[in-house]
Image (tube, grey):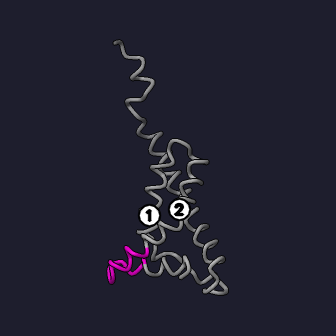
Amino acid sequence: DTDADLFEWMALGEGSPVEAHAAFAEFHRRHAKYLWAQCARRYKDDAEEIVAETLRRVYESATKFDRSTLSDPTDATASRRLVRAWVGRITRWVAADHFASQKKFPYLVTPGCISSLPA
């Protein structure tokens, strides 16, 4: 099964939650390590939150994935490239939301604040 097939099965969510969850588990197995590596390199200490939110949004928006641009729907390599490009866009949106939220609601307690407190 191609990565694009997984999105089709995740999109079944309400009709077949068992299949949707199984497809997401397989998606996670195939892509979480790659996603983590990309986010850790780009977003450093914020990677964990960005990866978690990206995976949540991927699952929720599986119905919006458009595989029609694939010239050969059975081509696993092309499917993987399309899926990773789509997930990459979601990741950038998640990161933008994450950093905008940090600016709007900065951390009130930081390691620097704690270390400057009198003993």
Q: Residue at x 47, y 39 (%)?
A: 103
Residue 100, placed above or below residue 11: above
Which quadrant: the C terminus? top left
| Marker disc for residue 68 | none
Q: Nearer the viewer, residue 46 or 66?
A: 46
The x, y position of residue 3, in whole percent, is 54, 76
Relative to 84, 15 lies left or right? left
Q: Please, what is the three-letter code of the amino acid marked with disc 2?
A: Ile
Q: Residue at x 41, y 39 (%)?
A: 105
Magenta segment, which residues?
10-23
Q: Please, what is the three-letter code of the amino acid marked with disc 1?
A: Arg
The x, y position of residue 13, in whole percent, is 36, 77
N-terminal label among 2 and 1: 1
Q: Check disc 1 and report its element: helix, strand or loop.
A: helix
The x, y position of residue 31, in whole percent, is 53, 65
| Residue at mark 2 | 90
Q: Residue at x 41, y 62 (%)?
A: 56
Task: Give me the C-alpha separation between circle 2 and circle 1.
Answer: 7 Å
The x, y position of residue 111, in whole percent, is 43, 27
Relative to 71, 94 lies left or right? left
Q: Check disc 2 and report its element: helix, strand or loop.
A: helix
Q: Are marks 2 and 1 in contact (CB under 8 Å)?
A: yes
| Residue at mark 1 | 57
